[in-house]
Amino acid sequence: MKVNIIAEVGVNHNGNFNKAKKMAQEAKKAGADFVKFQIFDYDEIALKKLKKTNYQKTNTSDQSENQYDMLKKLSLTYKDFDKLIKFCKKIKIKFLASVFDIKSLTYLKKKSNIIKIGSSEISNFFLLKELGKINKKLIISTGMCDFKSIRKALQLLCKNGQDKKKITLLHCNTAYPTPLNDVNILTMNKLKKIFKVSSGYSDHAIGCEAVYAAVALGAIVIEKHVTLNKNLSGPDHKISLDFKEFKEMVNVIRNITKT
C-alpha cells in the first residue's frame, strides 16, 4: 500500500524564500512525496486588528504584533512560489499548497493539479464553490468539524462540479499540540466509511505514535509539520519535526507498509 507523505512546511519558512527552498530540499532528502506550503493573501483573510490565538501568542516572540501583522511577515509572494514550484520540479519532489482565499486559488489553480484545503476553510463556502468548478484533486483536513459540516462541504463541492472520487479527507485535531488521548484516530476510517472517499491523517501531536497508528489503519496520506529548528519564533515550529526526525518517521512508515 502506497502512503503519500506530506512534509508540511506551512509558514515555517518565516517569510524567507531561501529557507523555503532549503526546506523543500530537506524534505526531498528525507523521502517525502510532497512538500506543502500555505498560499494566502493576508488582506483577504485577516482584519488589520485581528488578535493572535493563544497558541500563536505562546509560540511567537513579538507580543505586540497582531495576527494580520504576523501573517504579513510570514507570507511569500506569487513570484516566490513561481520559483519554488520550479525548484521542486528540478529536485523531483511534488509541490503542494493550501489556499485560504479566492485570489490565491486563482493563482494556484494554474500551477498544480492537487490542492490542499485546511481545516479552517471547510466552511469557506465561497472558496469551496470555486474549487468545485475547477475539479482538481483535493486533500481536505477536517479539524474542528463535525460530520454535518463535512457533509455540507462535500455536497457544495460536488454540486459545483467536483468529482467526489478526487477527494481525500484527512482526520485532524487542531489543538497545537494535540494530546495523544484526544487524537481519536479511529475517526479516520469513519470518514472513509461515511463519506465514501479516501482518507488519511494530518498530525499535530508531539512525536509520531499517532502517525504510525494511522498508517496501520490504512491511511493513504500522512501530513506532518517540519521545521529547520524547533526554537525558531513562529506559530508552528514547536509542534513540528526537524528533518532528522521526519526522515526517521518516513523510514518507519515505509517499513510498516512492507508488512
Image (tube, rainbow, N blue to C red):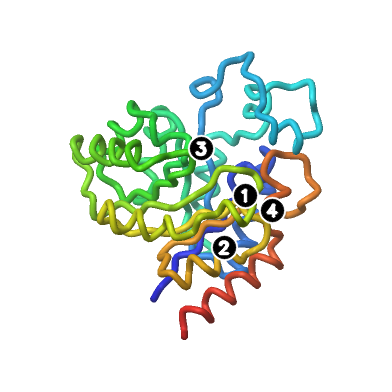
Q: CA distance from mark 1 to mark 2?
A: 10 Å
Mark 2–mark 3 Cα distance, whole angstroms, equals 27 Å
Q: For the residues marked 3 and 4, what is the alpha-carbon distance in whole angstroms?
A: 18 Å
Dot 4 falls on a residue whose secondary structure is loop
Task: Tell me the element at label 1.
Answer: loop
The quarter holding residue 160 reads top left
Q: Which residue is mark 2?
A: 210
- Marks 2 and 4 sit apart, C-alpha to C-alpha, by 19 Å
Residue found farthest to the top: 49
Q: Which mark is residue 39?
A: 3
Which numbered disc, 2 or 4, marks the residue closer to the eye? 2
Tags 3 and 1 in contact by the CB under 8 Å rule? no
Q: Quadrant of residue 226?
A: bottom right
Q: Tag on residue 227?
A: 4
The answer to which of marks 2 and 4 sits earlier in the sequence is: 2
Q: Which residue is mark 1?
A: 178
Residue 41 percent across, percent down from the top left: 51, 27
Task: Look at the picture and state if 228 lies above or below 146.
Answer: below
Disc 3 secondary structure class:
strand
Q: Secondary structure at mark 2?
A: helix
Identity, as a three-letter code, of the amino acid under mark 1: Thr
Front label number (3 vs 1): 1
Is the C-beta separation of discs 2 and 3 under 8 Å?
no
Mark sitting earlier along the chain (2/3): 3
Question: Residue 179 or 96: which is nearer the viewer?
Answer: 179
